[in-house]
Amino acid sequence: MDINERIQSVISEHRIVLFMKGTPQFPQCGFSMRTAQALAACGTPFHSVDILAEPEYRQHLPKFSNWPTFPQVFIDGELVGGCDIVLDLYQSGELQKLATGAA
């Protein structure tokens, strides 16, 4: 399976996916940490992929998603965005709706 198929598989298998530097328990950058915290505060389980441990994801995901930076959040198979967008959505209450499927 090529890397694009692997990326699509992860996104298809999990309702909410966070591609980040590190893990939610041990984030390796502030943007990843804040994004993971916002998702966790929604109270909905999410799957994370450590792009530092998976260099193929780090290399190919920006082209796959047409989004140049990390972290990247996907909900229901769609790219939501990175840290700033996720935090804005959280502050407005929209992230909670997206995360719970109420949107």
Image (spheres, rainbow, N blue to C red):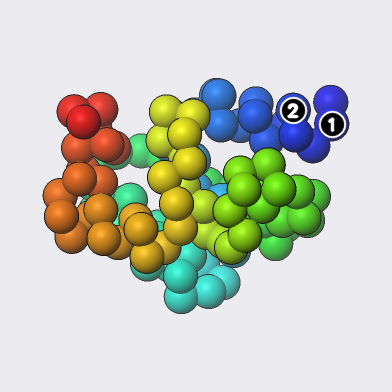
What's the amino acid at mark 2? Answer: Glu
Quadrant housing residue 33: bottom left
Q: Position of residue 71 (x, y in %)?
A: 52, 59
> Where's residue 45, x and y in %?
36, 38
Q: Quick check: marks 1 and 2 in contact, CB under 8 Å?
A: yes
Q: In front here: 103 or 21?
A: 103
Asked which secondary structure carries label 1, the reply is loop
Quadrant where the N terminus sits is top right
Q: Nearer the viewer, residue 101 or 48?
A: 101
Question: Viewed as shown, does residue 89 lie left or right of 33?
Answer: left
What's under tag 1, amino acid-wise?
A: Asp
User: Does the image show residue 81?
Assistant: yes
Tell me which residue sits at (46%, 47%) in the image. 73
The residue located at (67%, 52%) in the rendering is: 62
Q: Is residue 26 above or below residue 2?
A: below
Left or right side of 95 for 27: right
- Residue 21 vs 101, above or below: the answer is below
Residue 2 numbered tag: 1
Residue at 48% from the left image edge and 41% from the top image edge: 79
Q: CA distance from mark 1 to mark 2?
A: 5 Å
Mark 2 is surrounded, within 10 Å at the Cα level, by few (under 14), some (14 to 19) or many (20 or more) other residues, namely few
| Residue ranking furthest to the left | 93
The residue pinned by badge 2 equals 5
Callout 2 secondary element: helix
In which quarter of the view is residue 58 placed?
bottom right
Residue 24 visible to an observer of this rendering? no
The residue closer to the viewer here, 67 or 40, is: 67
Q: Quadrant of the C terminus?
A: top left
What is the x, y in percent for residue 41?
A: 24, 53
Instruction: Answer few, some or many: residues within 10 Å of disc 1's Cα (few below 14, many 20 plus, some between 14 and 19).
Output: few
Q: Residue furthest right?
A: 2
Asked where in the image residue 90 lies, by quadrant, the reply is bottom left
